[in-house]
Image (spheres, rainbow, N blue to C red):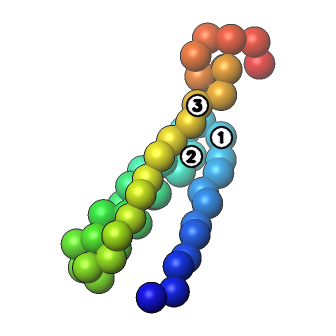
Amino acid sequence: MERCRLVFSGSGGQGVITAAIILAESAVLHENLKAVQSQSYGPEARGGAT
């Protein structure tokens, strides 16, 4: 099976994490594929300097 990697990136409030979760769940539920979804927040999301 061919491996595929998608990377989503954006600023807060754009719905990038939600889009990645929806795509990962769709791949698992409807195409019987394996998917991994993770997220990372910058310092501004944690109250640091912007």
Which quarter of the rendering shows the C terminus?
top right
Q: Amino acid at mark 1?
A: Ser
Farthest-out residue, right: 50
Depth order, front residue of 42/5: 5
Q: CA distance from mark 3 to mark 2?
A: 13 Å
Label drawn at residue 41: 3
Q: Position of residue 23 (x, y in %)?
A: 40, 66
On the rendered structure, is 31 left or right of 47?
Answer: left
Counting from the top left corner in percent of width and height, residue 5 is at 58, 69
**Which residue position is annotated with label 2?**
14
Q: CA distance from mark 2 to mark 1?
A: 6 Å
Query: What is the secondary structure assignment of the residue under circle 1?
Result: loop
Q: Quadrant of the N terminus?
A: bottom left
Residue 39 percent coordinates (x, y): 51, 41
Q: Nearer the viewer, residue 1 or 10?
A: 1
Is the residue under label 1 in contact with that under label 2 (CB below 8 Å)?
yes
Whether tag 3 and tag 2 are in contact, CB under 8 A, the answer is: no
- Is residue 14 at all visible to an observer of this figure? yes
- For the residue marked with disc 2, what is the amino acid? Gln
Q: Which mark is residue 11?
A: 1
Between marks 3 and 1, how big is the CA–CA gap? 10 Å
Q: Is residue 20 above or below residue 46?
A: below
Q: Earlier in the sequence, mark 3 or mark 2?
A: 2
Residue 29, horizontal then vertical, whole percent:
22, 72
| Residue visible at 26% across and 79% down in the picture | 32
Amino acid on which disc 3 is placed? Tyr
